[in-house]
Image (cartoon, rainbow, N blue to C red):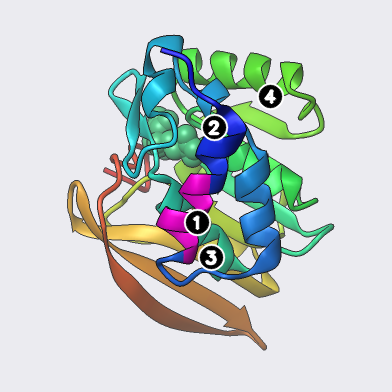
Amino acid sequence: MEIDPKRSRERMVREQIMDRGIHTPRILSVMSKVPRHLFVEEALTPSAYGDHPLPIGQGQTISQPYVVAWMTDELDVRPGMKVLEIGTGSGYQTAILAELDALVYSVERVPELYELARNRLDSMGYGRVRLKLDDGTLGWPEEAPFDRILVTAGGPSIPQPYLDQLADPGMLIMPVGPERRSQTLVVLRKEGGRIGRKNLGQVMFVDLVGRHGW
Ligand code: SAH
């Protein structure tokens, strides 16, 4: 089935993102720009702009467009910031961060997804994004501190390495358990050596698997 990607994206931004209250111009602009249909397998192209997550293989999913826009908006990513993403998956969220002119570091633990994301991001002109195949619950200590940390898988608690590797001032967003597949989206703000926490609402992410995860 043929789709018109540009029109599908405009509609997605209008109906799924603006109508739910996100109006930050640069968030709307990058969500209108990144070709989400190229981050899923060809058979799923017709549903790439639907209001839901989609499978990306290996039991993992690419998040619902609104959730990507919401998390990115809450994180307040500014040009030139160093951003750590945990769970590269398809690379879609990675591309959104790169389009915001952040210096993006993204960690994925599944080799097949890492390879696919690397090739995809390179071929789409996002070669500057740094990717690593590893247990992302350890963060990326060699590149710390990070101005922003965005975790796109749900864990039982916030891994200590993230708190250590977060810059001051800095912000982190992560879906936190206590159960699998049902989490509260949590924002942490580090400032002047203190950490503040805000709960944004219920979400459903795949598991963060690793030493400081499930
Ligand atoms: N941001 C992704 C969402 C992918 S789903 C996107 O836009 O497509 C979450 C991803 O987190 C999966 O690919 C999963 O393999 C990965 N993941 C789970 N635990 C991880 C860990 N400890 N380290 C790195 N990646 C992890």
Does residue 199 appear in this view?
Answer: yes
Q: Nearer the viewer, residue 158 or 202?
A: 202
* Residue 180 place in picture, x, y as percent: 18, 47
Ligand 1 sits in quadrant: top left
The residue under the point 50% across, 56% down is 14
Tell me where the magenta segment starts and ends, as one range: 11-18
Q: Amino acid at mark 3?
A: Leu
* Residue 147 place in picture, x, y as percent: 70, 64
Q: Quadrant of the N terminus?
A: top left
Question: Which corner quadrant of the image does residue 137 belong to?
Answer: top left
Question: Mark 2 — residue?
Answer: 36
Q: Disc 1 versus disc 2: distance between alpha carbons?
A: 15 Å
Does residue 142 appear in this view?
Answer: no
Element class at badge 1: helix
Main structural element of the magenta stretch: helix, strand or loop?
helix
Q: Earlier in the sequence, mark 3 or mark 4?
A: 4
Instruction: Count neighbours of disc 3 (C-alpha within 10 A) and say few if under 14, some if 14 to 19, many if 20 or more.
Output: many
Q: Earlier in the sequence, mark 3 or mark 2?
A: 2
Which of discs 2 and 4 lies nearer the camera? The answer is 2
Q: Verify CB contact (< 8 Å) between mark 3 and mark 4.
A: no
Q: Earlier in the sequence, mark 1 or mark 4?
A: 1
* Residue 28 place in picture, x, y as percent: 62, 57
Question: Mark 4 — residue?
Answer: 121
Question: Mark 1 — residue?
Answer: 14
**Residue 172: which numbered mark, if any?**
3
